[in-house]
Image (cartoon, helix red, strand yellow):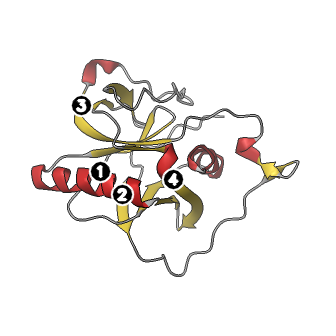
Amino acid sequence: MSRALPAAAVLLLALVLAACGGDDPVEMPTVDGAPAADAGDTVAGLQVRPVLGQLAELGCDVDGEPEAPGNAPADEEAALCDLDGIGYRLGPAVAGQEGVEAAELYRTGEAWRIQVTLDPEATDAVAGLAEDAASSDSQIALVVDGLVLNAPTVGGTIGGTLQLVGSWTGAQAEDYRARIAP
Protein backbone atom coordinates (compact mmCIF):
# COMPACT_ATOMS: atom_id res chain seq x y z
CA MET A 1 0.00 0.00 0.00
CA SER A 2 1.43 3.38 -0.98
CA ARG A 3 1.92 5.71 1.94
CA ALA A 4 3.33 8.61 -0.07
CA LEU A 5 1.97 11.97 0.92
CA PRO A 6 0.06 14.04 -1.60
CA ALA A 7 1.86 17.09 -2.97
CA ALA A 8 -0.69 19.30 -1.25
CA ALA A 9 0.30 18.07 2.21
CA VAL A 10 -0.32 20.57 4.93
CA LEU A 11 2.95 21.57 6.59
CA LEU A 12 2.85 23.83 9.58
CA LEU A 13 5.03 24.76 12.48
CA ALA A 14 3.15 26.47 15.29
CA LEU A 15 5.00 27.13 18.48
CA VAL A 16 2.88 27.94 21.51
CA LEU A 17 3.16 28.10 25.26
CA ALA A 18 -0.54 27.73 26.03
CA ALA A 19 -2.27 24.36 25.99
CA CYS A 20 -4.37 23.56 22.93
CA GLY A 21 -8.04 23.63 23.78
CA GLY A 22 -10.74 21.44 22.37
CA ASP A 23 -8.65 18.60 20.94
CA ASP A 24 -8.45 15.29 22.76
CA PRO A 25 -5.44 13.01 22.39
CA VAL A 26 -5.98 10.08 20.04
CA GLU A 27 -6.10 6.64 21.66
CA MET A 28 -2.98 4.82 20.44
CA PRO A 29 -3.06 1.19 19.26
CA THR A 30 -0.95 -1.22 21.29
CA VAL A 31 0.83 -4.55 20.80
CA ASP A 32 1.22 -6.52 24.04
CA GLY A 33 0.68 -3.34 26.04
CA ALA A 34 3.36 -1.30 24.19
CA PRO A 35 2.56 1.36 21.56
CA ALA A 36 2.33 -0.43 18.20
CA ALA A 37 5.02 1.61 16.49
CA ASP A 38 7.38 1.09 19.43
CA ALA A 39 7.25 -2.70 19.46
CA GLY A 40 10.84 -3.69 18.63
CA ASP A 41 11.69 -0.45 16.76
CA THR A 42 14.96 1.38 17.23
CA VAL A 43 14.49 5.09 16.53
CA ALA A 44 16.69 8.16 16.56
CA GLY A 45 14.05 10.76 17.38
CA LEU A 46 13.73 14.47 16.76
CA GLN A 47 16.30 17.04 15.65
CA VAL A 48 15.67 20.76 15.07
CA ARG A 49 18.06 22.19 12.46
CA PRO A 50 18.45 25.43 10.49
CA VAL A 51 17.81 25.13 6.75
CA LEU A 52 20.91 26.34 4.87
CA GLY A 53 19.41 25.77 1.42
CA GLN A 54 17.56 23.41 -0.88
CA LEU A 55 19.35 20.68 -2.82
CA ALA A 56 17.62 19.77 -6.09
CA GLU A 57 20.49 17.43 -6.95
CA LEU A 58 19.94 15.30 -3.85
CA GLY A 59 17.59 13.03 -5.83
CA CYS A 60 14.85 12.60 -3.25
CA ASP A 61 12.33 9.92 -4.25
CA VAL A 62 8.66 10.35 -3.36
CA ASP A 63 7.47 7.03 -4.80
CA GLY A 64 6.37 4.60 -2.11
CA GLU A 65 7.32 4.74 1.55
CA PRO A 66 10.44 6.85 2.16
CA GLU A 67 13.30 5.13 3.94
CA ALA A 68 14.25 6.77 7.23
CA PRO A 69 18.06 6.98 6.99
CA GLY A 70 18.52 7.89 10.65
CA ASN A 71 19.67 11.17 12.10
CA ALA A 72 23.07 12.59 11.24
CA PRO A 73 25.31 13.48 14.20
CA ALA A 74 23.91 16.61 15.83
CA ASP A 75 27.11 18.63 15.44
CA GLU A 76 27.40 18.04 11.67
CA GLU A 77 25.62 19.44 8.64
CA ALA A 78 23.21 17.06 6.88
CA ALA A 79 21.66 16.65 3.43
CA LEU A 80 18.15 15.20 3.87
CA CYS A 81 14.85 14.80 2.02
CA ASP A 82 11.36 15.74 3.04
CA LEU A 83 8.26 13.67 2.39
CA ASP A 84 7.42 15.65 -0.78
CA GLY A 85 10.80 14.95 -2.43
CA ILE A 86 12.53 18.24 -1.61
CA GLY A 87 16.19 18.00 -0.62
CA TYR A 88 17.63 20.25 2.08
CA ARG A 89 21.09 21.22 3.25
CA LEU A 90 20.77 21.55 7.02
CA GLY A 91 23.03 23.05 9.66
CA PRO A 92 23.96 21.35 12.93
CA ALA A 93 21.05 20.51 15.25
CA VAL A 94 20.26 23.04 17.97
CA ALA A 95 17.97 20.65 19.85
CA GLY A 96 17.45 16.93 19.78
CA GLN A 97 15.62 13.98 21.25
CA GLU A 98 17.11 14.54 24.70
CA GLY A 99 15.12 17.80 24.93
CA VAL A 100 11.72 16.17 24.29
CA GLU A 101 9.48 15.87 27.35
CA ALA A 102 6.32 14.61 25.60
CA ALA A 103 4.81 13.92 22.16
CA GLU A 104 1.04 13.64 21.73
CA LEU A 105 -0.98 12.89 18.61
CA TYR A 106 -4.20 14.68 17.66
CA ARG A 107 -6.48 14.60 14.66
CA THR A 108 -7.61 18.00 13.41
CA GLY A 109 -10.03 17.69 10.51
CA GLU A 110 -8.21 15.87 7.71
CA ALA A 111 -4.76 16.51 9.20
CA TRP A 112 -2.78 14.89 12.00
CA ARG A 113 -0.93 17.02 14.54
CA ILE A 114 1.98 15.90 16.67
CA GLN A 115 2.42 18.21 19.64
CA VAL A 116 5.95 18.05 21.05
CA THR A 117 6.72 19.56 24.45
CA LEU A 118 10.35 20.60 24.97
CA ASP A 119 12.35 20.99 28.16
CA PRO A 120 13.59 24.50 29.11
CA GLU A 121 17.06 24.04 27.56
CA ALA A 122 15.68 22.83 24.21
CA THR A 123 13.04 25.58 24.31
CA ASP A 124 15.76 28.23 24.68
CA ALA A 125 17.85 26.72 21.86
CA VAL A 126 14.90 26.52 19.46
CA ALA A 127 13.77 30.04 20.43
CA GLY A 128 17.22 31.38 19.54
CA LEU A 129 17.18 29.57 16.20
CA ALA A 130 13.65 30.84 15.48
CA GLU A 131 14.67 34.41 16.29
CA ASP A 132 17.58 34.17 13.85
CA ALA A 133 15.36 32.55 11.21
CA ALA A 134 12.59 35.14 11.60
CA SER A 135 15.03 38.01 11.13
CA SER A 136 16.40 36.50 7.91
CA ASP A 137 13.20 34.96 6.45
CA SER A 138 14.82 31.51 6.82
CA GLN A 139 13.44 28.06 7.50
CA ILE A 140 13.81 25.62 10.38
CA ALA A 141 13.72 21.87 9.71
CA LEU A 142 12.03 19.43 12.07
CA VAL A 143 13.76 16.13 11.36
CA VAL A 144 12.55 12.75 12.60
CA ASP A 145 14.93 9.82 12.12
CA GLY A 146 16.56 11.49 9.10
CA LEU A 147 13.34 12.61 7.36
CA VAL A 148 12.37 16.29 7.20
CA LEU A 149 8.74 16.34 8.39
CA ASN A 150 8.35 20.12 8.34
CA ALA A 151 10.57 22.96 7.15
CA PRO A 152 8.52 26.12 7.67
CA THR A 153 9.60 29.72 7.39
CA VAL A 154 9.50 31.20 10.87
CA GLY A 155 7.82 34.54 11.32
CA GLY A 156 7.82 35.16 15.05
CA THR A 157 8.62 34.10 18.57
CA ILE A 158 8.21 30.60 19.87
CA GLY A 159 7.61 28.81 23.13
CA GLY A 160 8.09 25.34 24.51
CA THR A 161 5.72 23.42 22.24
CA LEU A 162 6.29 22.42 18.62
CA GLN A 163 3.43 21.31 16.42
CA LEU A 164 4.04 19.22 13.34
CA VAL A 165 0.99 19.01 11.10
CA GLY A 166 0.60 16.85 8.02
CA SER A 167 -1.88 14.93 5.91
CA TRP A 168 -0.25 11.66 6.90
CA THR A 169 -2.15 8.42 7.29
CA GLY A 170 -3.02 7.49 10.87
CA ALA A 171 -0.31 4.81 10.84
CA GLN A 172 2.31 7.29 9.58
CA ALA A 173 1.28 9.88 12.18
CA GLU A 174 1.58 7.32 15.00
CA ASP A 175 4.95 6.13 13.67
CA TYR A 176 6.33 9.69 13.64
CA ARG A 177 4.91 10.38 17.10
CA ALA A 178 6.45 7.19 18.46
CA ARG A 179 9.83 8.15 17.00
CA ILE A 180 9.65 11.49 18.86
CA ALA A 181 8.18 10.33 22.18
CA PRO A 182 10.66 10.14 25.06
**Residue density around tag 4, few if under 14, some if 14–19, many if 20 or more, within 10 Å:** many
Can you identify the residue that label 4 sits on? 100
The amino acid type found where label 3 is placed reads: Gln
Instruction: Identify the secondary structure beneath mark 2.
Output: strand
**Residue density around tag 1, few if under 14, some if 14–19, many if 20 or more, within 10 Å:** some
**Residue density around tag 2, few if under 14, some if 14–19, many if 20 or more, within 10 Å:** many
Instruction: Identify the secondary structure beneath mark 1.
Output: loop
Mark 2 or 4 closer to N-term? 2
Measured along the vertical axis of the image, is residue 110 above or below residue 71? below
Measured along the vertical axis of the image, is residue 98 above or below residue 44? below
- Asked if residue 73 lies left or right of residue 92, the reply is right
Mark 2 or 1 closer to N-term? 2
Closer to us: 3 or 22: 22
Instruction: Identify the secondary structure beneath mark 4.
Output: strand
**Residue density around tag 3, few if under 14, some if 14–19, many if 20 or more, within 10 Å:** some
Can you identify the residue that label 2 sits on? 13
Instruction: Identify the secondary structure beneath mark 3.
Output: strand
Measured along the vertical axis of the image, is residue 97 above or below residue 108? above
Mark 3 or 2 closer to N-term? 2
Q: Residue visible at 19% across and 56% down?
A: 131
- Asked if residue 110 lies left or right of residue 151, the reply is right
Mark 2 or 4, which is nearer the eye? Answer: 4
